Amino acid sequence: MRTITFVTQKGGAGKTTLAASIAVAAAASGEKVVALDLDPQGSLWAWGESRAADEPAVDRLTAAQLAKLPAILASLEREGFTLAILDTAGVESTGGNLAMREAALCLIPARPTKLDIQATKPTVEALMRMEMRDRFAFVLNQCPPGRNSRSTEAAQGLSMLGVLATPTMTQRADHQDALASGLGVTEYAPDGKAADEVRALWQWIDRKTKGVPA
Ligand SMILES: Nc1ncnc2c1ncn2[C@@H]1O[C@H](COP(=O)(O)OP(=O)(O)OP(=O)(O)O)[C@@H](O)[C@H]1O
Ligand SMILES: [Mg+2]
């Protein structure tokens, strides 16, 4: 089972939004997906509760369960899950560190602002301390639509700090409306641009975690 962890101490970067839509896109591509909410806020779990579809499975872990994350993931693998998507809280936490350690790939969403890019540094430093230099990538999220210098400069800035996943995610109402409807963007508006971007991001993550050159 591959584990993908969305992490960054910066609140509102898009961890939960992307975790939900990537979980749905991955399930549609044939993965047996479990999405786990490790954030006490419970947003991903609440989204899961509002869904009618059975897949992906969505659950949450309490603070006490977090300490047993490796054993929980091993048990999910035995149940037949092929992909675990972990959504973490926007603060430095033991649970967040454990979730990073367990990941084949950590994804760090960041908005295209100087403050957001600076705010990724504690997360990157934590990953470096864990010797996970090769197991993280940034996702530039909530970019203004169209070509613009803000997104280009942010992409350049992040590329200097580590690998930048492609494509970048544009700010689109579909993301907000999908989550509010208990859906992933690929379910909410399958022909929309947000859905295209999420499917392409899932393909990038899939290749990266299978060791296929990007
Ligand atoms: N690509 C996007 N386009 C439009 N809105 C987005 C996009 N990504 C995230 N958002 C919106 O930004 C807000 C914050 O996103 P989200 O809750 O996913 O961030 P988070 O990193 O999980 O925050 P927290 O640290 O509080 O858990 C939400 O209102 C969400 O709908
Ligand atoms: Mg969140």
Image: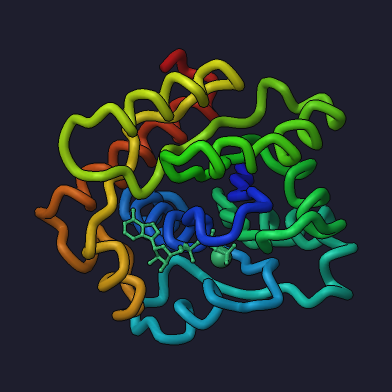
Residue under the point 57% across and 41% down: 108
Q: Is residue 71 left or right of residue 194?
A: right
Which one is nearer the viewer's eye here, 62 or 116?
116
Q: Is residue 108 left or right of residue 206?
A: right
Name the spot of residue 127 as percent of width and height, x first.
Answer: 76, 33
Closest to the observer, 68 or 6: 6
Give coordinates of residue 196: x percent, y percent: 20, 44
In the picture shown, does residue 96 fall above or below 205? below
Q: Position of residue 89 (x, y in %)?
A: 68, 63
Q: Ligand 2 sits in which quadrant?
A: bottom right
Q: Quadrant of residue 60?
A: bottom right
Q: How many marks?
A: 0
Q: Quadrant of the N terminus?
A: top right
Name above or below for residue 182 compared with residue 17: below
At x 78% / y 77%, what residue is drawn?
62
Above or below 63: residue 92:
above
Please report the residue visible at 19 percent of the width from the left and 43 percent of the height from the top: 145
Q: Which quadrant of the view contains residue 21? A: bottom left
Tell me what residue is drawn at x 28 percent, y 52 percent. Answer: 171
**Taking the image as drawn, is residue 63 in sight?**
yes
Q: Position of residue 113 (x, y in %)?
A: 45, 40
Q: Is residue 80 visible?
A: no
**Quarter of the picture holding the C terminus:** top left
Colouring chosen for the image of the structure = rainbow
